[in-house]
Amino acid sequence: MSAQNDTLNQYLFASGDHEEHQSLKVAEGAYKGWVPRAIYSKELYEVQLPFLRLLSFPVGGTALGSLSHKLTVFEAVGNYLTRLPACFAECHNLTKLNLGFNYFTEIPYPVYRLTRLEILNLEHNDLESMDSEIQNLKNLRVLNLSGNLLEELPKELRMCRRIQELHLSGKFYPGGKLTEFPECISYLTELRYLDLSWQHIGKIPRSIGKLRKLQVLNLKWNQLQKVSKELKKCARLKVVNLSGALRLLSAIPESLLELEDLEQLFLSDNFFTEVPQHVCGLVKLTQLVMQRNSLLRLSQDLYKLRYLRHLELSDNFLEVIPPKIKSLRKLEYLGLANNRLTELPEEICFLEQLTYLGLGNNKLTQLPENIYRLHNLRTLDVDNNELQDVPLLMDRLELLAEEDGLHILNNNLRSPFREISEQGTRALFEFLKGIRLKEAHHRWKMILIGAARAGKTSLRQALMHGRSRLAADSERTWVMERHLWEPESRLRVQILDFGGHHIYQAAHHMFLSSDALHVLVFDLTKYTSEDYEELIGHWLEAIMDRAGGAKIVIVGTHCDLCSKEDVNEKVEDIMRLMKRDETNKRRQIEYEIRMISEELDKPESREVSSGIPEIGIGRMQEKLNKLQKMLNSRSEIPERIFIVSAADTLEGIAEFRSSLILKLKSAPVSALPDVWFTFLEQIQQDREKVLTFEQTRDYFQQVMSDNQISQWGMGGSPERSLEMVLKYLHSTGEIVWYHDNDQLRGTVFHHPETLIDMLRAVFRHDFEDVVHYNQETATLIPLRESSFESMKKDFLSRGLLTKELLHYLLIHFKLCSDASDTFLNLIISVMLKFSLCFEFQNSARMALMGSAQVVQFPWFFPDEKPPNFELQWPLALPPNKYELCMEIVFSAQMPPNFFEKLSVKLHNFLLDANRINWKNGVLAQKNHSTLLVIRERKNDSMAIVIKARGDSDLQELWSLILNVRQASMNLFKDWPLLKCEIDLVCMHCVLKGVDDPHRYPGHVLEHMIPKGEYTLKCCEKFPDDSVPTCFVFPLEEDQENLELYLKAARDFMQKTIDSVDGPVTGANLALSDKGLNFIASNLGRNWTAVLLQLGVSQSLIEQLQISHQHDVHQQIMSALKRWRETDSDTTSPDDKLNSLFEVLTSESIGHIELVEKFKEHFKL
Ligand SMILES: Nc1nc2c(ncn2[C@@H]2O[C@H](COP(=O)(O)OP(=O)(O)OP(=O)(O)O)[C@@H](O)[C@H]2O)c(=O)[nH]1
Ligand SMILES: [Mg+2]
């Protein structure tokens, strides 16, 4: 007994909301023909005994014991019951009784006593009749007697007025026996659901009209000959099933067509040859099923059913699906199996909501190219057709792959499609990707570039997905994103979507290239003429300088937020400014070409003029060639500006997309050897982060020999052939390989994302806000919180990045789960090679930082000069010091990040120098010399000024200047069409204290110093002066006759001092330019206070500040000179000097030390 109890207990559960209600749900077939007796001793609320082969219940007895006390629900579906004992009537609480699928031949008598019953289910028994006692069950709501053999219904059923659901479907075999619509039903006015399917009813009487609450009427497989018009009064009907019921009627009953709210209509298994026109008037239909009719065509009216979600037309004789199918935009299910379709209209691809498309057993030879647009598709059945090909873009149907939902067996697919398709949807889709890679006709790299927040990413999404998906504010592009866009199956475009934040521009030039299509994006709402340069001009210039000849397209976004007039005005303005700039630029180049050509034509151009030996025809010719190339390979400025909105309206996007596609397809089809792409596939399968050139060569040789192709065929040697392939793959954006960068050509980024990730680890516009200490991440490094905080501070304030912080960042940004030391070294070396950073050499400082390797990023250098700058670099040239000065002046903008990169490059020759960095400058002390490199504005242009100062080692000064020059020249290679001038400032003028020194053309720096000529007459400011040759032409390291050149320099120094000051001494000498220079160099910040106290007026000082805007030293010198001139006839030099000393030593100025030094120097 207790064992039985135990087995039963496993099926006990507490039912529903009532914890105290114990219920029993025996698993199907758990016992065979019996139930443990324990059941009768329990007071159960609900009992379910499904499929236990019970012949009786209670089993073998007549007593229910305590079971009847609380029993409310009893279900014994699928047993062998034929009767119920009288005791069942004791279950007077029963509200639900389900005895379906048993063998009752009549409703068991005790059931009629269960007056609380609300649900009675006796479906699929063998009932032949129903007793009038049914009227006792006044609480019935659901009566299910489907699948029985009832010949009629007792009229007393009408008393069960609460019935809402009545199931009276006949037995499928031998068929129902009702031949008339039972009249009693029409009294059941609460009825919502009526199923009279599989009967033999021929007439639906008028009384049906009383069932005003009816929602579902199933008359499937009756033999209707007449349907009363009163049916129309059942105005709430939503679902009507007339499948197989209209075979004796030639048309749909009219009354049905007046049911305007009808949503689902089933008309399968009739003899319709067309979808009845009137049906198409039921505009609220969401489901129409007409399987197994004789449909020959689809009428135009069908497309009025705009709310249709489910259309089943399988098993008919349709040969054509009209293009208008596209109007059924809401369709989710379309069944067209077993028809005679030979083709599908492209328009079917507009049905983007489709999740099921059944096309099995037709005669289709191909599927529409754009089937990939059905992105919701989970099942596509095209079994048993005559397909030869699969649309190449089909693998975009991701849900189809997820559900393995493509059925494509028994077609005429060409090999190897057939074999692969048999392996499942995923395998086929992978294969398609490979085919596309190999068989593309056009391949492009397309660069989306433009200011921050211009709308690049939103535009990309609209282009790629054909939908509006505006980027949220938090979704700023981080460095850049790379996406494969295949608008057509044979057009392959790698889109590089750049982050517009200025910090990311450091990396832009690494990706711009002449063979890419550049899409310059700007936000129309932000445009004004004043912003032309920042939003458009600057970017155009960057593209043209870096990627001459590149195709450029300009797009204005946000047009939804601008009026038409506003847009037109702005477009006109941009076109005007763009043309103006371009014309000026071209004119300027043409002018220079003319000038050089004229110069070259002159016979005397080869002769020595004004003391400077000729710099060489070759040099001029070279410049001419460069200018000509610049002119010829200049990109065309775009002829129009596209106007779009990536917001909901998507205005202009379709037109923009088609013209982009046209542009991308305008080049001739590129037919390239398959093996190139097999090679690409293979290297991309390699899981290494980057590959060496040698590794790719091994792959290449393997692929070539597998395909029995000579590797020498293309380029003359395997290496040359490989270079050609790598270059090509780079130009299409598939890989990244810098063939023209000596330091980087050994590295192949076969996954371009690796390169992007490397940049992302360091460049982040909101670094300070998003990088925080996290214990879990830090444990992996490991890194203590205090070290982390100081490393973060060092990075943000001084651009110092430790290897540990880099490691932390990689994990923090989820760029990799844990980085090996090798990977960290690789990143550092790539960044070094890209000149994004340089090694920090201060080992003591590194020890304090707790790191063995630190690199420096100029992008994060402090804004301000160091506080003691003037001590290390006095504004005026101190006496007895040489100063070499070179200027690089950019005719337009300085290329973005040029200065930062130069700052990195300086490191190559300042390894052992003591170096101080800030945003606009570098000051380095190397041996006896000091180097200053600063970025500054000169009139309207930006310039880099390079100065080297020292006492005696002129050779070292030259080497510093030449090194900076060389570093700049190397950088210019990245901007081949960039225009800038290099000048050498005349040291002779500098030493003489001339305001606007003479400038020699930069070519002098490339020239060998003239042999045996130790002085030259070359300074245009002082044509009679002899200038030491080594002030103008560089001294080499192992300079012949070095001493003689240096002697000329020393003599000059001495002579200059004498000539400037004459044979003067004492106060006269102290008040000479040299003396004032000494004062000016050491005055410092409070110079204005000194001069005001000396009696120079405020307005004069301001005037001098304006006229020497960028040269404070000149401001001081000029002011001091003015002071010297004032009252010079009436005041003696001694008095003047005394008043100067008085001011300088006054309490408010406090330059006592300066006065002492001055007196000592001038022997006063
Ligand atoms: N109304 C409107 N908003 C747009 C449109 N295009 C972009 N936006 C919004 O403009 C902002 C910037 O868009 P993004 O697509 O992120 O711009 P982005 O150029 O990629 O920005 P970065 O990646 O940071 O350089 C977002 O808030 C977008 O929702 C447009 O056509 N209409
Ligand atoms: Mg973006």
Image: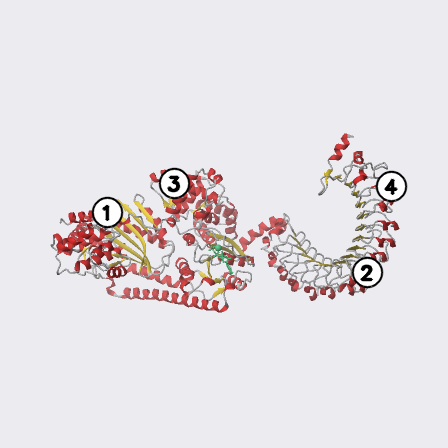
Q: Secondary structure at mark 1?
A: loop
Q: Which residue is mark 4?
A: 86
- The numbered dot on residue 660 is none
Measured Cα–Cα span from mark 3 to mark 2:
91 Å
Measured Cα–Cα span from mark 1 to mark 3:
36 Å
Q: Amino acid at mark 1?
A: Asp
Q: Which residue is mark 1?
A: 1038
Horizontal side of 1150 relative to 778 (left or right) equals: left
Horizontal side of 1126 relative to 280 (left or right) equals: left
Q: Nearer the viewer, mark 3 or mark 2?
A: 2
Q: Which residue is mark 2?
A: 208
Can residue 913 be seen by looking at this rendering?
A: yes
Measured Cα–Cα span from mark 2 to mark 4:
38 Å
Q: Do labels 2 and 4 touch, CB within 8 Å?
A: no
Quadrant position of residue 1072: bottom left
Q: Earlier in the sequence, mark 2 or mark 1?
A: 2
Q: Nearer the viewer, residue 596 or 334?
A: 334
Residue furthest out toward the top? 2
Q: Which residue is mark 3?
A: 853
Circle 1 crowding by C-alpha within 10 Å: few under 14, some 14–19, many from 20: few
Q: Secondary structure at mark 3?
A: loop
Q: Earlier in the sequence, mark 3 or mark 4?
A: 4
Determine whether the beta carbon of the residue marked 4 sits less than 8 angstroms from the nearest atom of ligand 1.
no
